[in-house]
Amino acid sequence: MAIQLADYEINIRSFHPEKDFGWSGLMFEGDNRGFSLKPSGIKPTTSRIWHKLTLSTKKITVTPVTVSDPSKAPWEDKKRIYSGNLAPKGRVTLKDKPLTNNSIYQYRLDGHYGGVNHAMPGSPVMQERLDFSYVPTLNVKYKVIIDIDTVNGHMDIVTYITGDAFPNCEAFIVDPGGQAISLGIHVRKGAPPLSLSLNADYPMIASALRLPLNNNGSFKGTVGDELFRQANRYPKLAFHKIADWNNRFTSIPANSGHCMLLEKASLEYCFNGLLK
């Protein structure tokens, strides 16, 4: 029986794992969490910006949602909610490729999201009146290519995400039944004033996965890391249980490899590489 074309949800999120951004980030409120696969927009999992794509592989449509969870400046008592012209912006284009051998459907997603911390004095007024702000924009770009083989029963998904390198970034895909699979993570580099201003388009996440599918399009239970196979020149693709694969990413400390002296009086991780 051929695999059914289904709806999938792709999440890309920028978050700060500490309670605040530290001295280099003027002590603005952070998200106080580690890497996560929990749904976007549902407490207690917050993000500075979360970008969610709902992809219908049957209708060949994609619906983006881009939101900044409420936060506050250190000199304010209440959290701010940004909407309208002050809200973060996101866009995505979807291209589908003609069938290959009447069994493989391909979808190419090319997008971007960005937003400004309008808690800085004067920024909201500038944005509303002049349509720009003196505050640096948090920028993230991405390319996602999905091939669904309805005969052999699997999805191949290639993900490439670039951006300012600050703050942390995580990406995952969710099947029709709510099963999430990590597409990769990134631990922040540098400090907000410099990293956000440079617009360096720094490579943050790159992955190429094969995901076996059930007949209804849901994930079957394993993950194959094609990027790892090619890098190590292994002849055969090895598969991992979804739980083991996800734990590989969510168990990594969200500050790993980031010199904490950039944010507070601590030398933690200043002399260590990213844990693997």
Image (spheres, rainbow, N blue to C red):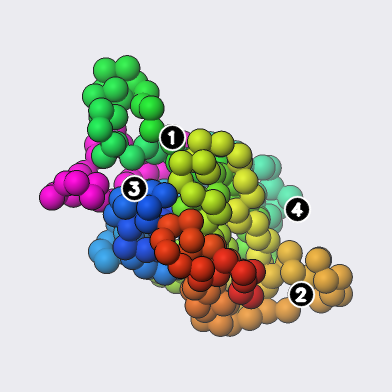
Whether pointer 1 and pointer 3 mark residues with C-beta atoms closer than 8 Å, the reply is no
- Part of the protein shown in magenta: 63-92
Q: Main secondary structure of the magenta part?
A: loop
Q: Amino acid at mark 3?
A: Leu
Residue carrying label 3:
26
The residue wearing badge 4 is 101
User: Which residue carries the number 2 mark?
Assistant: 237
What's the distance in space between the residues labelled 4 and 2, CA to CA?
A: 23 Å
Instruction: Specify the quadrant of the image occupied by residue 207.
Output: bottom right
Q: CA distance from mark 1 to mark 3?
A: 14 Å
Residue type (three-letter) at the residue carrying disc 4:
Asn
Apparent side of residue 76 relative to residue 95 in the rendered image (left or right): left
Secondary structure at numbered mark 3: loop
Residue annotated with mark 1: 136
Give the quarter of the image for residue 147. Answer: bottom right
Residue 110 seen by the camera: no
Q: Position of residue 45 (x, y in %)?
A: 32, 64
Q: Establish if 224 lies above or below 94.
A: below
Q: Nearer the viewer, mark 1 or mark 3?
A: 3
Q: Residues within 10 Å of mark 2 (few under 14, many from 20)?
A: some
In the picture, the disc for residue 98 is none
Lower position in the chain sequence, tag 3 or tag 2? 3
Question: Is 35 left, or right, of 200 in this rendering?
Answer: left
Distance from the alpha carbon under mark 2 to that under mark 1 = 42 Å
Q: Quadrant of the N terminus?
A: bottom right
Question: x%, y% of residue 270?
Answer: 57, 66
Who's the residue at 64% across and 49% down the image? Answer: 203
Outermost front residue: 265
Q: Nearer the viewer, residue 31 or 120?
A: 120
Disc 3 crowd, CA 10 A, few/some/many (<14, 14-19, 20+): some
- Observer-side mark, 1 or 4, equals 1
